[in-house]
Image (cartoon, helix red, strand yellow):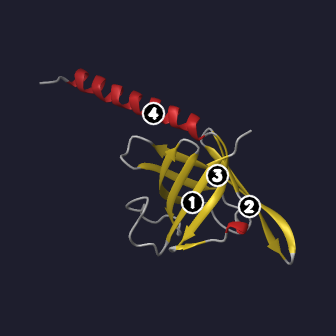
C-alpha cells in the first residue's frame, strides 16, 4: 500500500508529465494559421469569405484577424483572447476565452481540436459557455462550428 508521500510523488509526476505535454503542444500550435474552411450548422461557408481570416497563437494567447464589408467598405476586425489546452485527452481539448470588447462581454468556448502537422481542426459550439462537442465530427451539426486551418509558411 502506498503511503501519503508516495501518493503525492505519483501525483506530482503525473502533473509534470501533463505540464510537459502542454508545453510541447503549445510550441506546435504557435504561429499564424489561415482559416481554409468553416462549417457552421452543417453548411460550409464560401471560400472567398475566408481569404482574409487568420488565427495566430503565441504562448497561451491568440488573435484573429479578418476583413469584413461594413457599409460597402472593407474593415479589418480583430479579436484577442487566451486559451487553455489539454493534449492528454483522447480527443484533445481547447478552451478559448475571448476578451470583452465594446460590443460583447468576455466569452469562453469549450472545444475539441486535432493537430495533424500543418493542419488544425477545431470543433466548438456556436454559443459560448456551452457543453463541449462530443467529437470532432459530431452527428448533430446544429449549433456546431468546425474550423479547418492551415499553417502559414514564412
What is the CA distance from the residue labelled 1 to the residue labelled 4? 23 Å
Q: Are marks 2 and 4 in contact (CB under 8 Å)?
A: no
Q: Residue under label 4, please give it.
A: 21
* Quadrant in which the N terminus is drawn: top left
| Residue 11: mark | none
N-terminal-most mark, 1 or 4:
4
**Rounded to the nearest whole Å, what is the CA distance between mark 4 and mark 3?**
22 Å
Residue identified by numbered label 1: 147
**Label for residue 81?**
3
Whichever of labels 3 and 2 marks the residue nearer the N terminus, that label is 2
Q: Quadrant of residue 48?
A: bottom right
Identify which residue is drawn at 62% across, 38% down. 59
Q: Which secondary structure, mark 1?
A: strand
If you read the primary sequence from the N terminus, does the residue marked by circle 3 or circle 1 appear first? 3
- Which one is closest to the eye, mark 1 or mark 4? 1
Residue drawn 28% across the image and 26% down it: 10
In primary-sequence order, the first of circles 2 and 4 is 4
Residue at image mark 2:
51
- Front tag of 3 and 2: 2
Q: Secondary structure at mark 2?
A: loop
Amino acid at each position: 500500500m502506498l503511503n501519503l508521500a508516495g501518493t503525492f510523488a505519483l501525483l506530482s509526476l503525473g502533473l509534470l508529465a501533463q505540464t510537459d505535454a502542454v508545453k510541447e503542444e503549445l510550441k506546435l500550435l504557435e504561429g499564424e494559421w489561415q482559416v481554409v474552411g468553416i462549417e457552421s450548422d452543417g453548411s460550409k461557408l464560401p471560400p472567398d469569405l475566408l481569404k482574409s481570416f487568420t488565427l495566430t497563437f503565441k504562448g497561451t494567447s491568440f488573435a484573429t484577424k479578418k476583413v469584413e464589408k461594413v457599409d460597402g467598405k472593407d474593415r479589418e476586425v480583430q479579436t484577442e483572447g487566451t486559451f487553455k489546452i489539454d493534449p492528454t485527452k483522447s480527443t484533445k481539448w481547447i478552451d478559448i476565452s475571448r476578451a470583452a470588447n465594446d460590443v460583447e462581454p468576455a466569452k469562453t468556448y469549450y472545444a475539441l481540436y486535432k493537430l495533424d502537422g500543418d493542419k488544425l481542426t477545431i470543433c466548438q459550439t456556436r454559443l459560448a459557455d456551452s457543453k463541449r462537442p462530443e467529437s470532432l465530427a459530431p452527428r448533430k451539426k446544429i449549433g456546431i462550428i468546425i474550423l479547418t486551418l492551415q499553417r502559414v509558411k514564412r
